Structures are given as C-alpha cells and as structure tokens.
Amino acid sequence: MHKLENCNICPHRCGVNRMNGKTGRCKATDKVKVALASIHNFEEPCISGKNGSGTVFFSNCNLNCVFCQNYEISQLGKGKEISIEELADIFIKQQNKNVHNINLVTPTMYIYQIIEAIKLARDKGLKIPIVYNSNGYENVEALKHLKGYIDIYLPDLKYSNNEIAYKYSNIKNYYENAVQAIKEMYNQVGTPIIDENGIMKKGLMIRHLVLPNQLQNSKDVLKWINDNMDKKVFVSVMAQYFPTYRANHFPEISRKLTKEEYNEIEQYLYSLDLENGYIQELGEHEEEYVPDFSRFSI
C-alpha cells in the first residue's frame, strides 16, 4: 500500500499521504469504505442475468457530479470502514448467493486494496467474473495494475468535452483521461465474451447517461466510441436521468429526460456501425421512466 503514501491513483494526482489519514479530492483514506453489498437485478441483462449481479458499493468518489443519484454515498461518504480481509469475505458471500459476478461500484480510490482482496478471495475459491464499474475518470498507470484481476470493465463516458465536465462534475480534464482509460480497459479484456445464457464473462461495456438539453454531448460521445473502438464492444445508452442532489441549480438539467430527446439519441445510435449494446425504455410521459434494457443489436 506504499503507493497511497503519495496518492496519484487517479488523474487528480493529489499527492496526499492516505496512510496517515490524509485525504485528497476523493476523501478516501487508506481504509476501504463500503456503503452496501447487495444483489442487483437491474443492470444490463448480460450483467444481471437471472441471478443478479453481486454489487459492492464503495463510498466516496473522485468526481463531484451535481446530478449524482447516489450522492449520500459518493459525496457525503456514507458507509462503513472494513478491512481487506472483510472485503474478500464479502466477495465470497456474494458468490455463495449464486450471483453472476462481483460488481465493484465506484472502486477507483481503492484499486490497491481491491487487488489484495481479490487475491485473498481467490485463495478461498472465488471464481466468478469481477466487474469494474467506474465513472471513467481513471489513470492508465493505475489501471495497468488491475490486469488479470478484472474480467469486465463497465466505465462511463459521461462527457465529450471538458467544458461540460467542469460545469457538472467539477473536472477540468475528464475527456482525455476517460478515453485513454477506456482504451486501456479494452487492451486488457478485449472483445466481449458472452456465454450460452447471455451472460458476459469478459469484455468492455461503455455506459453513457443522456442529459436533458445536452444531446450534442451524447452524439459526440457515441461518435467517439464508433470511431475509436472495436464495433463489437457493448454500449449502454441510459435514459434514467432525473434531477437530484444539486441539479436544480442548473436550469437546463433541472428536469427529467423527455421521450423525444431519448428517441433522437436512439436514432443517432442506430445510424452508427456499433453492433452490440442496450437502450432503455421510456414511457409515453417522462415521469413514466421504465428501468428496462433492450438489446439494440444481435
């Protein structure tokens, strides 16, 4: 854990000594902090399947998104400090519930502890895939340590330009770091592997949340994926935005996404060459959001 003595685990490169309890932008110390371990049945179908995904929600975050739906965990630090041994035991307990995978949600701040926990858990019989469920703001150098430990990368690509990223997530260099991180993730896990039951065993799925009044941002994100990634990489275009936390301070995103807005992005997606992924269903009215995923290609 000596790397935490001068923490550069993410692109903020705060340089603080987390081993002495100091905290940087993400507010994490050297202790793993977990808010919730649960079975999640509402991820994309190839992740949740019939038995669910074994999620572990880590506390704190290296972004400050004004619309964060989990802000109590990410921004306010809700959770409990646990040991690396306890984290390994959580992985085993999740596997014993017959879930399809271990889903690490917002894990960036704890990369080195997670690696040690995976080693311990593997010694105890952990065999199911590990999902790295990230906001995309990652250091390539840190991600390289995860090679061989992560089977499925599930990053966000939130923004196509840094002006929007700074406005909504207080990040000045999101885009260039996120796209380089996603390329490294692909280099590690390659083309998605789906088993006979439709469950992803290995590979990359890029998520993007469509924001109201920011359709060009979404189109530019999808175009980058189309132009720069393997066409078989999975893409998940999400419609579940709703204004929470501090979103009401920004009038243009202080409402839910409309069906018309999402349909426009859906049609743009169909115009690209991407082969695999998911869209979400919206009801006739924006308040009737239905959290179901549909495969857009086979």
Image (spheres, rainbow, N blue to C red):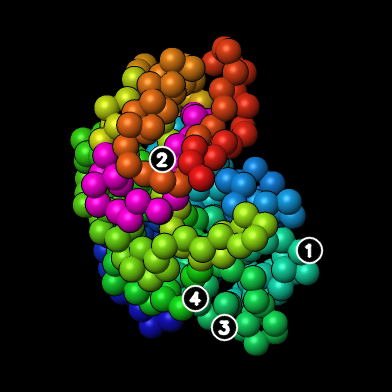
Are the two marked residues, 2 and 3, in contact with CB atoms closer than 8 angstroms?
A: no
CA gap between label 2 and label 3 equals 31 Å
Q: Secondary structure at mark 4?
A: loop
Q: Secondary structure at mark 1?
A: loop
Q: Earlier in the sequence, mark 1 or mark 3?
A: 1
Residue 165 in the image: x percent, y percent? 28, 39
In the image, what residue occupies the spot 65% across and 51% down?
Answer: 48
Query: Which mark, residue 13?
Result: none
In the image, what residue occupies the spot 22% across and 39% down?
Answer: 161
Are the two marked residues, 1 and 2, in contact with CB atoms closer than 8 angstroms?
A: no
- Residue type of the residue flagged with mark 2: His
Query: Which mark, residue 208?
Result: 2
Query: Which mark, residue 119?
Result: 3
Residue 158 in the image: x percent, y percent? 35, 41
Instruction: Please report the bounds of the magenta region as a residue range.
Output: 223-241
Q: Residues within 10 Å of mark 4 (few under 14, many from 20)?
A: some
- Residue receiving disc 4: 149
- Residue type of the residue flagged with mark 4: Tyr
**Magenta segment: does it hold 238?**
yes
Query: Which mark, residue 97?
Result: 1
Quadrant in which residue 274 is drawn:
top left
- Residue type of the residue flagged with mark 1: Lys
Are the two marked residues, 3 and 4, in contact with CB atoms closer than 8 angstroms?
A: no
CA gap between label 2 and label 4 equals 24 Å
- Residue type of the residue flagged with mark 3: Lys
In the drawing, does residue 237 fall left or right of residue 32?
A: left
Compare residues 265 and 193 and report the one nearer the observer: 193
